[in-house]
Amino acid sequence: MSVATVGHPETTTLPVIDFVAPMPGFPDDRRFVLVRLEDTGMLYALTSVDSAGLRFLVVPPAQFFPDYAPEIDDDALAALGVSDGEDLLVLLVVTAGDGVEDATVNLMAPIVLDQRSRRAVQLVLSRSGLSVRQKLVVVA
């Protein structure tokens, strides 16, 4: 497992996440690190190791969408090298607006990460009927 030093206010050495296929629209970027942006673990930056300045804000869905359970097909599991979803972490890409109240997430294209191998894939659930711009609201 490789590590990367990331230019973040608290510069640390983090394990590299390898995407088994590039994220749509970013064919040259497959290596990222996950940087926690605040203490509660609700907001992260998925930061490219290879392209300076490329990062995606991501959140785990549980605090916002407790019933969200994307179907991870056998092809995705095989690409990650796992037989079941037990050690998988699901992350949603955030689109920031003018303020926190304008933030949305893409429910149709979750990032799925195998926490053991640090391999990831972004699924595109095109037939799911899920929104690509779902309002981000914390569930109490």
Image (spheres, rainbow, N blue to C red):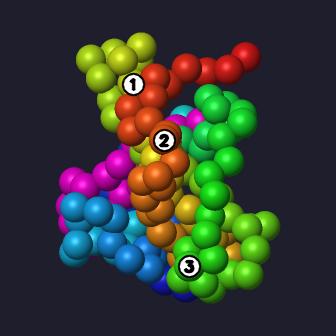
The residues bearing labels 2 and 1 have C-alpha atoms spaced at a distance of 20 Å
Q: Position of residue 115 (x, y in %)?
A: 66, 69
The crowd level at tag 2 (other Cα within 10 Å; few <14, some 14-19, many 20+) is few
Q: Could you say where residue 58 lies in the image, as x and y percent from the top left? A: 47, 45
The N terminus sits in image quarter: bottom right
The residue located at (43%, 74%) in the rendering is 19
The residue nearer to you, when weighing 132 against 113, is 132
The Cα–Cα distance between marks 3 and 2, rounded to whole angstroms, is 20 Å
Residue 129: mark: 2
Q: Residues within 10 Å of mark 3 (few under 14, many from 20)?
A: few
Task: Name the spot of residue 6 as percent of width and height, x first.
Answer: 37, 61
Secondary structure, mark 2, is loop
The residue indicated by pointer 1 is 103
Indicate whether residue 53 is drawn in magenta. yes
State the extent of the magenta-drawn residues as a range: 39-58
Which disc is residue 75 wearing?
3
* Earlier sequence position, callout 3 versus callout 1: 3
Where, by quadrant of the figure, is residue 88 drawn? bottom right
Amino acid type assigned to the residue bearing label 2 in the image: Gly
- Residue at 46 percent across and 47 percent down: it is 108
